[in-house]
Amino acid sequence: VSDVASLLAGVVGPDNVLTEGAALADYGHDEALSVTPGQPAFVVKPGTTSEVAGVLRIASEYKLAVTARGSGTGLSGGTIPRPGGLVMSFARMNQILEIDTANHVAVVQPGVTLADLEAASAEHGLSYPVYPGEMSASLGGTIATNAGGMRAVKYGVTRRHVLGLEAVLASGEVLRTGGKPVKLSSGYDLTQLIIGSEGTLALVTEATLRLYPRLPAQAVLLAPFGSLTKVTTAVPRILASGVGPLMLEYMDARSMAMILQGENTDVGIPDSVRETTQAYLMVVHEERDSGRLDADVADLAELLADAGATDVYALPRAAGRRIIEARERAFWAVKRSGADDILDTVVPRAAMVTFLGEVEKIAARHQRMVIGTGHAGDGNVHLVVFEPDEVARGQLMREIVAAAKASGGAVSGEHGIGTAKVKHFLEQADPVALSLMRQVKKAFDPDGILNPGVLFG
Ligand SMILES: Cc1cc2nc3c(=O)[nH]c(=O)nc-3n(C[C@H](O)[C@H](O)[C@H](O)COP(=O)(O)OP(=O)(O)OC[C@H]3O[C@@H](n4cnc5c(N)ncnc54)[C@H](O)[C@@H]3O)c2cc1C
């Protein structure tokens, strides 16, 4: 260990290598609810791409497992290091290298957080739309998980916004893909292959990202419904209208109660309405000016009422902000309420009705509470499972994932497979696709040192 530590210190400097002490434990976990933390042998904090390359050359030579770490906010155990392995923390590579206002592009290092990029883009009237709620997440981590979040219904998920990457292969070779052009038809798209690969193919050291004009006028509508079915049928109708909302989030009544209670907040829904509500739809819309906004909001309110909403509340600015923030922090509220695990299954949005019906039956069969929120416009359902027994929980979740697959969906829409969902992924993945994925992995990382355990087990 000490030989390798001094080699690593030779590359990144002794202050940027940790080999013992409590600090190592900080790098052994992410926010996944059910994954046992790991203890790495080394934590390395490179400051430049050539330092990343130097560390990877050493890791290759000593066959050390390398786990990349952004902010550690992932929900799938993707940052859990292998015993004896190395964590590559990108915390020091946190510079915004360029905001190119003519091309609407940002060039960033991987340790830049979403919050930092949002603040820097706002100064130029621009915005990076990936919005998982957890704004401390890093660009490297969100690229590696292909993060989605609440604005994806309008702007799409991370892969829509990454134009180019610099990434280091396990061998230490530096790869550059794409760039500022918004279109390319020049060979295989390696940018897209690396996005969502969860640190298993290459480590991202720079990204070229699309920015969009910020639209200043925003409104928040909250619509309670007497049944979840009505919510899921309202969603395609809203999208078919062409209004194009920024967010379209559903929360079942139990999740909403936990979220509001957890945040100690109230958005003014009368008790009489709350008592008959099974689920809520939150619709956020943005426009260039208040005239356009008001016209669209009127249309949205009419659509929601026609779809069977008990009422439609156009929330005042402060209450609107509070409900969005409470929704952002839904994960912490359910965690405090004793949730044992969460899934982020995705189905075609029109199949949400059938899928959620199946989930209800599965929960009833297991006599366990399964509650949900989700990016309804994307068919991305976040299910919170309350079942402390690990074996029983595994079976319950297996049935939910099988139901998602039967509805034409998949195990994860945005959090990734990590180590937490490997079993479900391997059970449900197409065997030919899986075999090709293993060959791709071998082409990038022949010795399998990059995040072993993730995706393939
Ligand atoms: C409260 C809360 C709400 C959330 N809501 C959402 C949501 O709505 N939508 C959503 O998509 N996600 C959501 N997430 C999870 C989300 O996946 C993460 O916040 C984010 O994508 C991970 O960023 P990170 O920097 O924390 O990455 P980490 O957790 O550090 O790492 C995540 C993965 O990326 C890899 N990785 C990190 N950096 C690099 C790099 N430079 N190169 C290669 N691989 C790398 C890691 O090895 C790991 O596999 C939420 C999380 C929390 C805590």
Image: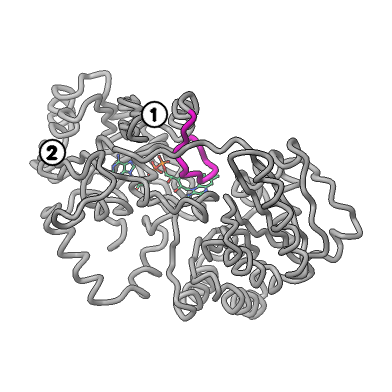
Q: Nearer the viewer, residue 447 or 292?
A: 292
* Of pointers 2 and 1, the one earlier in the residue sequence: 1
> Residue 406: x and y, percent?
46, 81
The numbered mark at residue 23 is 1
Q: Nearer the viewer, residue 407 or 43?
A: 407
Amino acid at pointer 2? Val
Question: Who's the residue at 39% across and 49% down the image?
Answer: 158
Question: Who's the residue at 69% across and 44% down the image?
Answer: 219
Q: Nearer the viewer, residue 378 or 94?
A: 378
Real-space CA distance between mark 2 and mark 1, rounded to the nearest whole angstrom: 30 Å
**Would you say 415 lies left or right of 3 here?**
right
Queried on whether the Cβ of the residue with tag 2 lies below 8 angstroms from ligand 1, the answer reads: no
Q: Which residues are magenta?
A: 125-136
**Would you say 185 lies left or right of 343 here?**
left
> Residue 134: x and y, percent?
52, 41
274 is within the stretch colored magenta: no
Question: Who's the residue at 64% across and 49% down the image?
Answer: 284
Residue located beneath label 2 in the image: 174
Amino acid at pointer 1? Ala
